[in-house]
Structure formats: structure tokens, C-alpha cells
Amino acid sequence: MQTVQAIAQDILAREGEYLNDPDDPGGATNHGVTVHTMRRLGLDLNGDGVIDADDVKVLTAQRALQIFIDEYFHKPKLDHLPSPVQASVFDMYVNAGSNAVKILQR
């Protein structure tokens, strides 16, 4: 069984770097973390008092990895799921948030 760290590394490798596509409802995204997530977590990385695309740009891969593990694996208690589905649900959670659980339930 893969460790949560290894699963998170795999997800991170697929997510890519900074993108701010006006057609993407997620808004500015870097390493798979959106500006909306950063606002929810209060991550003003450049210290200007505003959480915006500039903060997303400076998000490191290591910080994104920790967000994945803390917010999208441990917080929703994915470790309580059977180990064969943890990686898939974790990946879905990074991309779909709590909708991942609803998708699984369906």
C-alpha cells in the first residue's frame, strides 16, 4: 500500500504549475491548489493583506503537498476508507472537494 505522502506526490505530479484561465471556474491555480482554497485557509503568502492570484503564483510545491495531505486526506478522514480506494478518493477530493464523497456514495 502506498503511503499518503506517496499518493500526494503522485497527485502533485499530475496537477501542473501556475494557471489562471478565465474560463476555469477554479480561478488561479498552482500545483492543484486554487485561489479559493487559499482564501479559505487564509494563506496570504506575500503578506499584502489580500489573498489573490499573486499568492497563488508563489505557492510552492511543498506547501501544496502539505495542503493536500492535511486538507484533502486527514481532515475528511480518508484514512478510514478501505486502503484500495484511498488513492482514488484522495485524488478526487483534490479535484472535486467534498463532492468526491458524494461521487463515491453514488
Image (tube, rainbow, N blue to C red):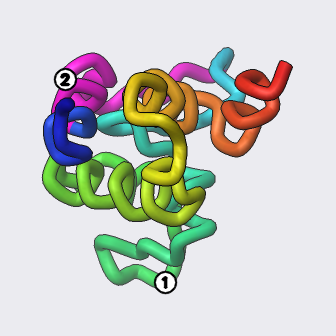
Q: Is 9 rendered above or below residue 67? A: above
Q: Which residue is mark 1?
A: 49
Q: Left or right: where does residue 67 sit relative to residue 89?
A: left
The amino acid type, in three-letter code, at marker 1 is Gly
The residue at 64%/31% (across/down) is: 96
1 vs 2, front mark: 2
Label 2 environment density (alpha carbons within 10 Å; few <14, some 14–19, many ≥20): few
User: Looking at the picture, how far across and down is residue 82, in whole percent?
Assistant: 48, 36
The residue at 32%/23% (across/down) is: 15
User: Looking at the picture, how far across and down is residue 42, in whole percent?
Assistant: 52, 77
Q: Is 78 rendered above or below residue 70? A: above
The residue at 34%/38% (across/down) is: 30
Q: Left or right: where does residue 47 sit relative to residue 104?
A: left
Label 1 environment density (alpha carbons within 10 Å; few <14, some 14–19, many ≥20): few
In which quadrant of the rendered view does residue 22 lie? top right
Secondary structure under badge 1?
loop
Q: Nearer the viewer, residue 1 or 75?
A: 1
Decide: marks 1, 2 in contact (CB < 8 A)?
A: no
Q: Mark 1 or 2 closer to N-term?
A: 2
The amino acid type, in three-letter code, at marker 2 is Ala
Quadrant holding the N terminus: top left
Q: Residue furthest right?
A: 106
Q: Which residue is mark 2?
A: 13
| Magenta stretch in the rendered image | 9-22
**Residue 20 among magenta residues:** yes
User: Looking at the picture, how far across and down is residue 25, in whole percent?
Assistant: 71, 28
The residue at 50%/61% (across/down) is: 38
In which quadrant of the rendered view does residue 58 lie? bottom left
